[in-house]
Amino acid sequence: MKTQLIVASVLMMAAAVPVRAQTTGGATALTIKGASDSRLSLPYQPPRVEGGTVSGVTANALVLQGEEWESDQFTRRADGTGKACYALFLEGPLEGVYYKILSNNEDTLVLDTEGDKLDAHPLGAIAFGTRVDIVPYWTVAEVFGADEASVLLEPRVSPLFPTDDVLLYDNGRTGTNKAPVTTLYFRRGEGWRSVAAPSDSSADTVLPPGSVFTVRRRGATDLELINFGVYYRQRRAVFVAGGATEGNDQYVSLLLPEPVTLDESNLASGVVRPSASPLLRADEVLVWRSANPGFNQAPDTVLYYRPLIGWLKVGDNAPVGSSFTLAPGEAIIIRKKPASPPADWLQIPPP
């Protein structure tokens, strides 16, 4: 079995930047099935590159005390230098929330808050002194290999002859049974490309924390992807959009490297709207548990929550909240029914 180890860049960054006490290093093995679609996520992230404490807040910017950064140090610049990063709150009401950094000057981060207002945030006020870390995103080249010597997936010899692909989703779009919006592949002699723009490099395409991607492996043999990095032993937050008018599938995952049961997952705390009965189900959690190979497979397990009863699996009347676990790196669909409100999935590590 061929194995890809995401380790070189992590170790170089870790050597340069001490890992703070609230982080823990580790690794997990993710199986890419042969002749199948494997839906995955990355529970371990790269180490922080910077951080500080908040001394000022506006609607979309943070001032960190006493910093002296280079301009746009935490973004991917037009000239190909720099690396895309996000700001992660380590404490306070926004603990575990992160936002992409759009630009920075010597002490200020301008963030893509996706409509949130930092100075009037629905989770609460950001206090001066709140600790924030600056963390780089994984890129597709770092995760799957940047050149022919290191790439895990089988390269294409031409855009017209598919081999292995990485499929990306857009949770900003509404609807159920959503198709991928981006198809990436490694082309021999050229590197990472996309079906939409086969002449342009896609090596720096980011894989955000908590996001889900599908590896479409056309070869018959299984592959193993080792996700090596750090995780924050603290609450993490994943935004789950609402159901809109026609329902909405949200592709999400655990940001924790340890399995949690449904009861421990916090999904019943305002994320998954409770159901009145097995026939009148509201929001649902969909997962893939079948070991059978294949492409374009629908989720085979559907879960829902009933007050006073707990978590149930469609087709089984026995509660499963304390026994059914969600695994690190496992793709999850939260199917929000029409008019179901958005929510932050606040994930808390088990004790």
Image (tube, rainbow, N blue to C red):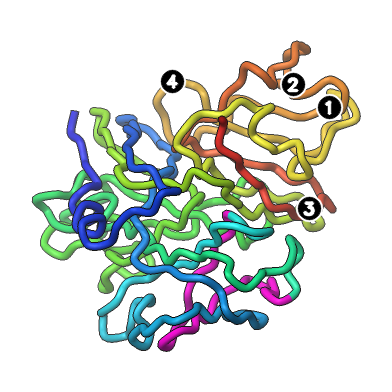
Q: Earlier in the sequence, mark 2 or mark 4?
A: 4
Q: Residue 99 at x, y = what percent?
A: 54, 67
Q: Which residue is mark 3?
A: 246
> Where the N terminus falls, by quadrant?
top left
Q: Which residues are magenta?
A: 96-119
Q: Amino acid at mark 1?
A: Arg
Disc assigned to residue 306: 1
Badge 3 crowding class, 10 Å Cα cut-off, few under 14, some 14 to 19, many 20 or more, is few
- Secondary structure at badge 4 equals loop
- Please say whether residue 213 is visible from this viewpoint: no
> From mark 4 to mark 1, how far is it between C-alphas?
28 Å
User: Which residue was labeled with disc 2?
Assistant: 312
Q: Mark 3 is on which residue type?
A: Glu
Query: CB of mark 4 within 8 Å of CB of mark 3?
Result: no
Tag nearer the camera, 4 or 1: 1
Of the residues tagged 1 and 3, which is closer to the observer?
1
Q: CA distance from mark 4 to mark 3?
A: 31 Å
Q: Is 51 located above or below residue 327 in the figure?
A: below
Instruction: Give the residue displayed 74% in from the left and 15% down from the top.
Output: 319
Which numbered disc, 4 or 3, marks the residue that appears first in the sequence? 3
Q: Quadrant of the C terminus?
A: top right
Element under disc 3:
loop
Distance from the alpha carbon under mark 1 to that under mark 3: 22 Å
Q: Which mark is first along the chain, 1 or 4?
A: 4
Is there any visible trace of residue 64 in the rendered image? Answer: yes
Residue 114 among those drawn in magenta: yes
Q: Which mark lies nearer to you, 2 or 4?
A: 2
Circles 1 and 3, Cβ within 8 Å, touching? The answer is: no
133 is within the stretch colored magenta: no
Mark toward the viewer: 3 or 2: 2
The residue labelled by disc 4 is 291
* Mark with earlier residue (2, 1): 1
